Amino acid sequence: MKNTHITFFTDIGAQKPNSIKNRDTPCPFCRIDELEEVLDKSGSIILVKNKYTVLDQAFQTVLIETEECEGELSEYTKEHLYKVLHFGIEHWERMIQSGKYRSVMFFKNHGPLSGGTIRHPHMQIIGLNEVDCQHDFSESQFEGIPVFEKEGVRFTVSNKPRVGFYELNVIWEKDAELSLFADCIQAGTHFLLNHFHRNCTSYNLFFYKNHETTYCKIMPRFVTSPLYMGYGVQQVANNIEKIAHKIKEIYFSA
């Protein structure tokens, strides 16, 4: 029987600072000299053990993306974007290959509806001892309307979304250029925050690995559909072809 539930320690969660809801809260990722248990560093990119270990049976790390507290992945220079993705993917893969964990999550929260608490740009890499975080992964969740395809990298708008409505996908085949993968992720996040037909302030990035292929799900965050919450029914928007065309026109028409 698959173990799909993990214990969340509410007493520890209550101690976490929230600089998204309260901008007067001192940012723990800005005070670099006070960071505890630094695991690795590359310039302004830092991997630390998470001080607030809210999950049971898990090794929790935080990847601080930049020293700029108001920075955002969608606006990084290409040089820094590539460094962040390379650093994150390298450490994610190291944790997977270590064999210590049942599975390893690699994801990013941005914005007040993303489930995150710290405004400062960061990602999380979490090794799970007992839970398989990809227990319901399916390649079909990354199928959809094509936006871009080149040399082993594909960008699509989901026609079979995990949750519903609008989800952007980037698929990276082994030996393809990381820069193409990163460019598509940046284009997707920038589109959601700047050109989406709805006011979008929040998104998640979720990374998955299946055999030799890496997948990234770019998910805009709004109030979750009651059909999905109550019945697991995913709704697909009727204008995803228009969304795909608009992304292609803005970012890939040159």
Image (cartoon, rainbow, N blue to C red):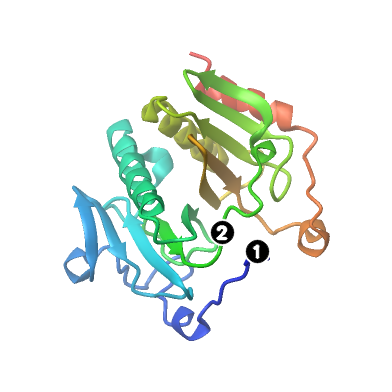
- Which residue in the structure is indicated by mark 2? 132
Q: Residues within 10 Å of mark 1 (few under 14, many from 20)?
A: few
Relative to 187, is 67 on the left or the right? left
Residue 167 position (above or below residue 119): above
Q: Residue furthest bottom?
A: 11
> CA gap, disc 2 to disc 1?
8 Å
Residue 195 can be seen in this image:
no
Q: Which mark is residue 2?
A: 1
Work out whether residue 240 or residue 229 is closer to the camera in this orientation and state it.
Answer: 229
Q: Residue furthest top?
A: 254
* Coordinates of residue 192 in the picture (x, y in percent): 56, 41
Q: Residue at x 24, y 60 (%)?
A: 39
Q: Residue at x 28, y 57 (%)?
A: 47
Q: Residues within 10 Å of mark 2 (few under 14, many from 20)?
A: some
Relative to 15, is 170 on the left or the right? right
Going by the numbered disc 1, the residue's amino acid type is: Lys
